[in-house]
Image: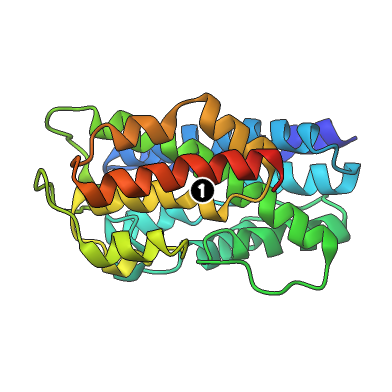
Amino acid sequence: MSDALVRLVAERFDAFTARFLDATGDGFAYDLKIKHTKRVLGIAEDIAKAEALPEDETLGARLAALMHDVGRFPQYQQYTTFRDAESVNHAGLSVRHALREKLLDDVPAHIRRLVLGAVFLHNKRGLPRISSHALRTVSKVVRDSDKLDIYSVIIAHFAQKNPKHPEVALNVIDVPGKYTPSVLNALRQRSLGDYRTIVYVNDFKLMAIGWLYDLNYRSSCRTLRERGYLDMLFDTLPRDESITTFRRQIDQDIARKIEGA
């Protein structure tokens, strides 16, 4: 039942996104989000299995992973950016289009509520207090899965000599050696960064490293360390005393999170 439902919703997602690929415009941006969504689904399934989540929460997480970026397609079509602050909240747009396009038809009502709630919450700076244990769990899985895949996307982007698609990194300015001290200072306080404060490519990289403090599961932290994403990002940052100190902090903190301390 669950697998068949996920396949059905995935087919609807494919049909929905195909309209954007077929239209005139930047196919790269749309293809980027399609591939991202499919990988996020796989990561969500891995987390749900590693954390031995109940069937309803696992199904909710899988479907929310498929739906979490539905709004990115109309967002980019209208505004030519993925930066919410310069366009529209893509999470709210995802909920709206999931409903408008009937992408979740045939999904049981209690699962559909979990999915839409998790989609709406997936890009919040931090999760608010949620009374529903199931919604909190599904939201955490989707947020972790989203971040873990975005690491691979931005690392591949920054590995290019002259990236053709600056929208991947929210159109930040590439000035080697420069970063915004307030961005680093917030992260050293283990505070989640604010995207409105980033200016430089290095700010974006620092913010991505700081996502560690918003990962919810030990399995997510293990994946992050095993894939070496943090080291890859740190190796491209300035090697001054402040960055070096922050790197030591991150190394210690990820070890504690994996150990469950």
Mark 1: which amino acid?
A: Leu
Image quadrant where one finds the N terminus: top right
Toward the viewer: 126 or 259?
A: 259
Q: Is residue 38 left or right of residue 187?
A: right
Residue drawn at point x = 87 percent, y = 54 percent: 108
Image location (x, y in percent) of residue 168: 30, 44
What colour scheme was applied to this rendering of the protein? rainbow
Image location (x, y in percent) of residue 229: 42, 32
Image location (x, y in percent) of residue 76: 34, 54
Question: Can residue 13 be seen in this snapshot?
Answer: no
Quadrant housing residue 63:
top right
Residue drawn at point x = 80 percent, y = 38 percent: 51
Residue drawn at point x = 18 percent, y = 42 percent: 238
Whether residue 168 is situated above or below residue 171 in the rendered picture: above
Residue drawn at point x = 79 percent, y = 32 percent: 49
Whether residue 133 is situated above or below residue 205 in the rendered picture: below
Q: For mark 1, does the 10 Å Cα neighbourhood hold few (<14), some (14 to 19), or many (20 or more) residues?
A: many
Q: Secondary structure at mark 1?
A: helix
Whether residue 141 is situated above or below residue 41 in the rendered picture: below
Where is mark 1, residue-wise? 212
Q: How many marks?
A: 1
Q: Is residue 135 left or right of residue 36?
A: right
